[in-house]
Amino acid sequence: NVFTLALADEIDSSNTQLTTRAAQGAPHGLVLAAERQTAGRGRLGRRWQMRLGAGLTFSLLWRFDRGLSGLAGLSLVVGIAIVRALREFGVPVALKWPNDVLLDGRKLAGILIELSGDALGPAAVVIGIGLNVEAPGEVDQPVANLADAGCKVGRNALLAALLNQLAGVLAQFDRDGFAAFRDEWHQLAAFIGQPVRLSFSHGEPADGIAVGVDDSGALLVDGAAGRRVFHVGEVSLRAA
Ligand code: BTN
């Protein structure tokens, strides 16, 4: 078995804790699940808040053979693992680029990936996942939860299914890169072929039709000025 599971009642953030442990040599496959986070973090410097026991909150340390420069598209691939796991329980989720998981167009789960290592040597990656099981977390957009969707699966079964899918998907990604997942991502993604607006921390938003992703997971958007390529980073997307 590739995983070692550690449980915490209360910590600041499972991503923060696991990043520290990774620097201290923690093993590949270490999972830290938290009942409660006092300083849960989201993408783009946002907070991730969740009522006690209402969600599934965990981080996974994965040591890749690939270096940091080969990890483009990783966040999309983690999304695929989550969708596959939830569909095992009949929950019809979809993906929003780069890595939100949507249920009925509302956010069900978020992913926060933090990287360390060098460009070429093996990269150590902390993959944090927060999933609303009973009550929504406090986020910047409409949220969904599994209970409202009629899904009664327990958190342990959910975690097991997620880790199972992650193990397969991450191993294949390490071997083959994002290109091997591109078609599946297109099938699971919301917004493809639709008008979207991309917002940045600085500068004007960009509007256009989301046509898909390239082999590095970058989003391709056709706008008035032609096709533009957006890399995962300081950008967020919504339907326009
Ligand atoms: C986002 O949608 O902005 C990402 C949210 C990620 C939240 C998870 S909860 C477990 C892990 N620990 C954190 O502090 N954040 C991630």
Image: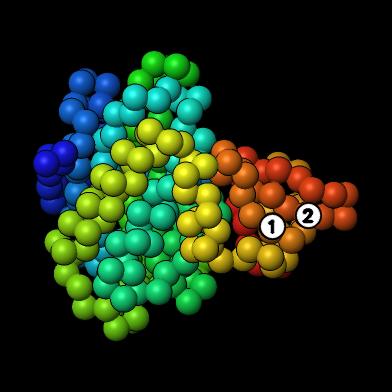
Instruction: Give the percent coordinates (x, y) of residue 85.
Output: 30, 62
What amino acid does circle 1 point to? Val
Q: Residue at x 26, y 35 (%)?
A: 61
Identify the residue at the far right of this view: 225
- Using the image as rendered, state which of residue 71 and residue 139 is in the foreground: 71
Which of the 4 quarters of the picture holds residue 32? top left
Asked if the residue at tag 2 contacts the one at tag 1, i.e. Cβ–Cβ closer than 8 Å, the answer is yes
Residue 7 as seen in the image, left or right of residue 208: left
Q: Residues within 10 Å of mark 1 (few under 14, many from 20)?
A: some
Q: Residues within 10 Å of mark 2 (few under 14, many from 20)?
A: some
- Which numbered dot is residue 222? 2
Q: Residue at x 18, y 28 (%)?
A: 27
What amino acid does circle 2 point to? Asp
- Which numbered dot is residue 211? 1
Q: Earlier in the sequence, mark 1 or mark 2?
A: 1
At numbered mark 2, what does the secondary structure look like: helix, strand or loop?
Answer: strand
- Using the image as rendered, state which of residue 168 and residue 201 is in the foreground: 168
At numbered mark 1, what does the secondary structure look like: helix, strand or loop?
Answer: strand
Instruction: Give the percent coordinates (x, y) of residue 124.
Output: 33, 27
- Using the image as rendered, state which of residue 14 and residue 189 is in the foreground: 189
Vertical placement of residue 216 versus 52, above or below = above
Indicate the colouring scheme.
rainbow
Quadrant where the image shows the C terminus: bottom right
